[in-house]
Image: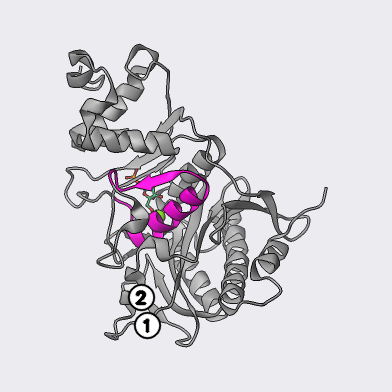
Amino acid sequence: MTVATLDAVLNSYVGKEQDDLRAAVAATVRQLAQAAVKIRHTINQGVLGKAFAGTRGGFNADGDAQKDLDVYADDIFLDAMRHAPVALYASEELEQPVLLNKDAPIAIAIDPLDGSSNIDTNVSIGTIFSLLPATGAPDGNPAATFLQPGEKQIGAGFFIYGPQLALVLSLGSGTHVFVQSTRLGTFVQAYESRIVPTRAHEFAINAANYRHWDEAVRLYVDDCLKGSEGPRERDFNMRWIASLVADCYRILMRGGVFLYPGDKRRGYGQGRLRLVYEANPIAYLIEQAGGAATDTIGRILEIEPNSLHQRVPVVFGSAKEVARITRYHTDPSSIGERSPLFGNRGLFRA
Ligand SMILES: O=P(O)(O)OC[C@H]1O[C@](O)(COP(=O)(O)O)[C@@H](O)[C@@H]1O
Ligand SMILES: [Mg+2]
Ligand SMILES: [Mg+2]
């Protein structure tokens, strides 16, 4: 079997004409991949290594408590981007973007360590990145570069530090999955142009927030839970890993939907996930894999961000199921015959 390495795939993406922007994207992805391998080594050491699960006592720009590994990963990726054709580096862990090489063509927004609450539980965690054109910030505000809608991304991806170290990557034509081969010392393509399976059997949501959700989300979940005895007339499974990368990877492999809606808790009106460096890259990967991603109603990739660290409600996965969730929000009467029992009494509320 011939193996397609990440290097070979990036070379063919750049092409013989050596398109400058594509060459810059490829160089950036190569640097990201090297940095991810370093982080993988640290994670493998667990508490035996340094920079692991301690809490810094500090908080990131969004008010989340920072773990040592959040800050360590941020340092490693920032350093890697100093060696890439990157003009601006924006991170979940930094209030403001860092200006690197002002003449370079790429701006990167990154969640250096996704799924932080899982660090000390030995569950998959990851790094999410979004590549944007480094358009000028006329008002001298570097954060303005990151206020482009997600459809302007020139590439996006995530690394998942799971049983395998994998890279899920899209550079605008399909979503590809690479696995790091320790034998070959490089990332090797495992799936070319992954397609999200169309029929959803699984939904992912943090059900502990049930009482805080709005009616549309409760009804959707109630209908899934009723399974073959409810309006869906089939059984569903539920999963919640609490690592966006791991939930997304599963959906790419076997379909389903993910929801992190806004809810009534203080500070959660727009959910938990950040638009620029979590929702946008995940939406890009999912759409490139034939799925859909919304803020429950509209396409995530069309949202004009107001600020670098803003949150957004997120629903993504199998396109039909995502469209159905939109209908629960916009036109519940179109969902089909709903007996009063289904409409008013959820299992959690019985
Ligand atoms: O703990 P909750 O509320 O279920 O939230 C889990 C979600 O939060 C996140 O951990 C947020 O990402 P960070 O770890 O980068 O802050 C997602 O990976 C995950 O989907
Ligand atoms: Mg995250
Ligand atoms: Mg994070």
The residue most toward the right is 1
Location of residue 200 in the rendering, given as x and y in whole percent from the top left corner: 46, 30
Image position of 243 (left or right of 302)? right
**Residue 210 visible in rendering:** no
Mark 1 CB near ligand 3 (8 Å cut): no
Q: Is residue 328 above or below residue 169?
A: above
Q: Secondary structure at mark 2?
A: helix
Residue at image position (50%, 44%) is 290
- Residue wearing tag 2: 145
Q: Is residue 279 magenta?
A: yes
Residue at image position (49%, 58%) is 127
Q: Is residue 172 above or below residue 231?
A: below
Residue at image position (65%, 66%) is 13
Residue sitting nearer the eye, 338 or 111: 338
Residue at image position (68%, 70%) is 15
Identity, as a three-letter code, of the amino acid under mark 2: Thr
Location of residue 306 in the rendering, given as x and y in whole percent from the top left corner: 25, 66
Q: Is residue 232 above or below residue 152?
A: above
Q: Is residue 117 above or below residue 350?
A: below
Residues marked 2 and 1 touching at CB (< 8 Å):
yes
Q: Is residue 58 magenta?
A: no
The magenta stretch is 272-297
**Residue 135 visible in rendering:** yes
Residue sitting nearer the eye, 321 or 184: 321
- Residue wearing tag 1: 136
